[in-house]
Amino acid sequence: MSDLKALIFDVDGTLADTEKDGHRIAFNMAFKDAGLDWEWSSDLYEQLLAVTGGKERIRYYLDKFNTAFNRPDNLDEFIASLHQSKTGFYTKLLSEGAIPLRTGVRRLIEQARDAGLRLAIATTTTPANVTALLQHSLDKDSESWFEVIAAGDIVPAKKPAADIYEYALKEMGLAADECLAFEDSHNGILSSSGADLATIVTINDYTKSHDFSGAAIVLDHMGEPDEAFNVLGGMQPHKSYLDIDVLKEIHQAVT
Ligand code: XBP
Ligand code: MG
């Protein structure tokens, strides 16, 4: 059995609740700015989250929910430009400190650094969005804490494909059984499990009814010493918040 050497984090929904009050709002701002009358409600957005990637999500919306829209000839360019505008609005929201990190995230990342664990990111979101969240919600210099930031179009097949996690593992030169992944969604765990990674799931409002079979453990959040997590599935650890001891316990139990 291998020692635990690295942690690989998803971003959206895992490090912070970015979807409902971040991405969704930014999409709507971009639509309005482009003179479109599209408005993605929270309920509609929950359905749109079936598809990862912002550009892919806009296309899915047109295919499934707005078939009457009179598409321009250059649909790819139209979507790319809308999405670029959305990224601008989203990163501006983050720079205003709009989205805090979820419970336990900052402490766990800081403890992992102190313990010499290597850190990486594997996400579907655009690289600029990761930079903005890390700089404004974690620490000005925190991008450098992560050895690999695997994000967005760096791999053509987004989650649920395993490619983004496989890319991160390859860049780090690590085997899957030397790492733990952190996810919040069904598409996320399909991706991490597809790369053979043991995965810790922290659910959120959008993902609480997802299928997380295959997760090492399913939690409502990472927990803090004074704020216990609830174990919703998988193994039962000896503490009620994630720290390095518990990560090692989980890693040992499942790899
Ligand atoms: C995140 C996503 C992303 C964001 C939007 O999924 O699906 O598409 O919603 O980001 P995961 P972009 O957490 O599973 O990686 O608009 O930059 O694509
Ligand atoms: Mg996610």
Image (cartoon, rainbow, N blue to C red):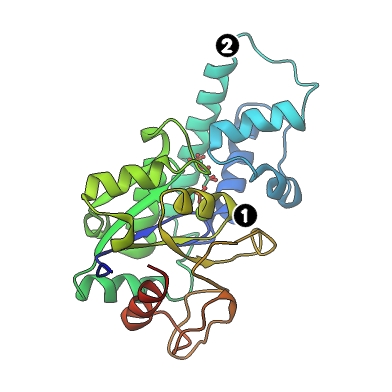
Q: Quadrant of residue 181?
A: bottom left
Q: Whole-percent x and y of residue 41?
A: 73, 47
**Other-residue count near label 2 (Cα within 10 Å), few / some / many at <14 / 14–19 / ≥20:** few
Residue at point 42%, 38% (across, down): 152
Q: Which residue is mark 2?
A: 74
Closer to us: 238 or 62: 238
Q: Quadrant of residue 243?
A: bottom left
Identify the residue at image location x=33%, y=56%: 176
Q: Is residue 127 left or right of residue 113?
A: right
Q: Which mark is residue 202?
A: none
Residue drawn at (35%, 44%) of the image:
166
**Residue at disc 2, secondary structure:** loop
Q: What is the number of the mark on residue 20?
A: 1
Q: For the point 43% across and 30% down, which residue is it?
A: 156
Residue type highlighted by circle 1:
Lys
Residue extending farthest right: 68
- Cβ of mark 2 under 8 A from ligand 1: no
The residue closer to the viewer here, 236 or 79, is 236
Q: Quadrant of the C terminus?
A: bottom left
Percent across and percent down for residue 136 are 37, 58
Residue 95: x %, y % from top left: 41, 53
